[in-house]
Amino acid sequence: MKKESEFYRRKLDNGLTVLFEKRKLPIMATCVAVKFGAQNESSDIKGISHFIEHLVFKGTKNRNVKEIPRQIESKGGILNAFTGEEITGFWNKLPHKYFNLGADIIRDLILNPLFEKTSLERERKVIFEEIKMYHDNPSSYTIEKIKEILYKPPFNMPIAGTMQTVSNLSRKKIINLFNSIYSANNLIFCAVGKSNFEEILKEAEKFPKFNKKINSIPIVLQNKELIEKRKGIDQTHIILGFHMPKLNDKNRYSAEIFDSILTNGMSSRLFQEVREKKGLCYSIRGCLEQSKDYSYEMIYAGTTKQKIKEIKGIILKEIKKLKNLNKSDFEENKEKLIGLRKLSNEKSESVMMGLLQEELAGNAKDYYKYEEKINAVKINDVRKLAKLKSYSFFGLVPDK
């Protein structure tokens, strides 16, 4: 695990928060994230953060749509962006000697997008195709569906929005929201790689000082069970989900161990029980989605219509069995998680994303306390999570 002495964090006079991990490998991963994502959107503008993420790449005051990617990729770099529930991020990864270029391009995207009308309408069609792509992929659709039945609107709506909400996002709405949110006090500048903190600060200080407020929208929990039929598919897709401790909860690390034992990898209990012992499916996997404002576990499997009840029963049984978790499995999964974090730390962009998540949860420095926090978890903390009071369940089945 990296020493904290290699990490720097500072809040600048312009309002921007800077995070930096210094490395020897001659690579720089740089991200600027705005603390506004899908969870901040009301039902009528759902998908607007994702739309803005797309649109800034279509041209700025200083670069056209071709120059933006070419200036990064011609240097052997990677340019990308993402929209999450909590943040919208823009990042690149380059040989370290081009760090200033990478920082300048991200700053240009955030400060100077044109939102040109023709490009905007063209990109709206692209997003329509993206929405249809996720809908038409049964496993993606099923995974997205669990959030819909674990929460009430507007949080339960897709990050990309719907065909209707995206259709209703006018250029004026997009520009007004962008101008009301994208300011230095709402930004995190995160860099990981070979540089020095003074150089990072020079780039971060180039953002003009503005102070704008982000309004939060309540996230309301629920639980439902739902079966949906679809023509043209042969496999049944099922998912079971339940609410878990959030990132600012004292049991957040217990939830990671719980998830690891149950769903993480070929040695996990569900993979062994459902696939290896009984051959009931090809794919069974889980994921723990955690943030400071919401958290849930989801367990997905692809199977036959006749096996829904059996697999669902096994999942619930294996969860219940964790009430009697033994010390050997408990310690083994602690070691597994610590090892996986060390493997993840090889990638500068993984560390960058981890630092952003911890900063949103409270303080990025907590990223470096992972091993200590995992080791501090008591076995009974994990056992308590097995006392499942309620859950949501969705099945997408062939309509034959």
Image: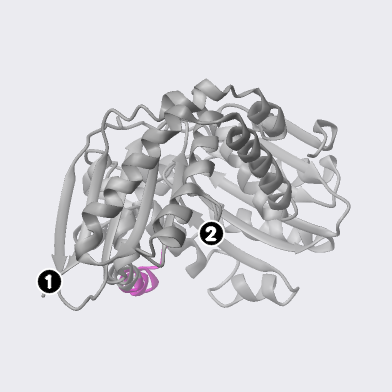
Residue at 36 percent across and 65 percent down: it is 281
Q: Is residue 198 left or right of residue 244?
A: right
Does 16 sit above or below residue 162?
A: above
Q: Secondary structure at mark 2?
A: strand
Magenta segment boundaries in residue numbering: 114-126
Position of 247 relative to 21 (above/below):
above
Measuring 15% from the left and 55% from the top, which residue is drawn there? 227
Q: Is residue 1 among what the camera can see?
A: yes
Q: Quadrant of residue 154?
A: top left
Distance, label 1 to label 2, CA atoms, is 37 Å
Looking at the image, is mark 1 or mark 2 earlier in the sequence?
2
Chief SS of the magenta region: helix
Residue on which disc 1 sits: 399
Give the amino acid at mark 2: Ala
Residue situated in front as seen by the camera: 342 or 50: 342
SS label for mark 1: loop
Residue 58 position in % (x across, y down)? 48, 69
Q: Are marks 1 and 2 in contact (CB under 8 Å)?
A: no
Magenta stretch holds residue 118? yes
Specify few, some or many for label 1: CA neighbours under 10 Å numbering under 14, 14-19, or 20 or more: few
The image shows residue 171 at horizontal and vertical percentages of 31, 59
Residue linked to disc 2 = 81
Q: Nearer the viewer, mark 1 or mark 2?
A: 1
| Image quadrant in which the C terminus is located | bottom left
The 10 Å Cα crowd at callout 2, few under 14, some 14 to 19, many 20 or more, is some
